[in-house]
Amino acid sequence: MTEARPSAQTWEADSYARNARFVSDLALPVVDLLAPRAGERILDLGCGDGVLTAKLRDLGAEVVGVDSSPEMVAAARARGLDVRLVDGRALPFDREFDAVFSNAALHWMPDPDAVIAGVARALSPGGRFVGEFGGHGNVAAVVVSLLAVLARRGIDGRGLLPWYFPTAEAYRAKLEAQGFVVDEIRLIPRPTPLPTGMSGWLDTFARPMLGGLEDDDRRRARDEVMELLRPALCDEAGNWTADYVRLRFAARKG
Ligand code: BEZ
């Protein structure tokens, strides 16, 4: 089998808004867990197009967003937000925030230890780190189908997987190793209806896996992934549901 090289994930704000608005729509429980207070300084880590950053601002917090995608940073700034182009592994803040918040972003960031170290530096003593992202078993059927379709082409896709989906125990250990006190951490299976179906999801999120294929073959591969998934994730009426598992946590800098 050929070892494949990862294609960069690219983000198009319009396509993200069309295919993935549910990501921010489903974030209210983690915003509740953060319980933002008026006047607090909050860092939104991996803020994407800024929908939740704007919500935190509207709740009275003073929010800074960071994201590593120039397209997403531009979309978030268009909402009038203070958003900076920053790699999550190299947060440049020093004891500036009362809380760091993150929704559906940490699974995209390689080197979780570097990310957590940057969060610890960014927080004032006692500051909160509250977030939710893909946990162990997240999109398992989708992952297996992508690997199977690449294997048909003689490609070992395991090295292409861009996502970090830890268990609660593994992530707790990482947080505690950097001095956090973990108040809550758990995996939450959350089958998630996909408003634009599996094709919209794959087009938006699976580029690192399929992006190395030629255009025609990429479309064929996407269709093959959908055929493998159909019996598991598509109902008789044609509605798709993704096999999401969230890891939700709240921690404090000790
Ligand atoms: C997630 O939010 O769990 C997710 C999104 C895109 C790719 C993989 C996982």
Image (cartoon, rainbow, N blue to C red):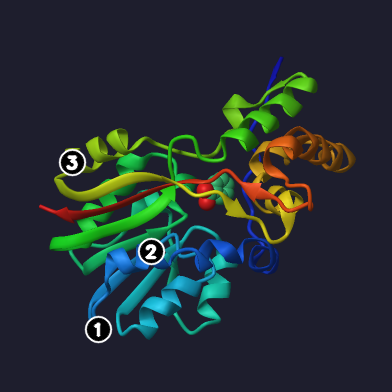
Pointer 1 residue: 38
Residue contact at pointers 2 and 1, CB within 8 angstroms: no
**What residue do we see at 71% from left, 14% from top?**
1
Can residue 169 be seen here? The reply is yes
Pointer 2 residue: 29
Label 2 Cα crowd, 10 Å radius (few <14 / some 14-19 / many 20+): few
**Which mark is first along the chain, 1 or 3?**
1
| Foreground: disc 2 or disc 1 | 2
Can residue 82 be seen here? The reply is no
**What residue do we see at 86% from left, 36% from top?**
217
Pointer 3 residue: 176
Please provide percent x and percent y for residue 137: 49, 35
**Which mark is first along the chain, 1 or 2?**
2
Q: Is residue 174 left or right of residue 198?
A: left
**What residue do we see at 64% from left, 68% from top?**
17
Please provide percent x and percent y for residue 149: 75, 28
Which amino acid is tagged 2?
Answer: Pro
Which amino acid is tagged 1?
Answer: Ala
**Which mark is first along the chain, 3 or 2?**
2
Q: In this view, does 153 lie to the left or right of 132?
A: right
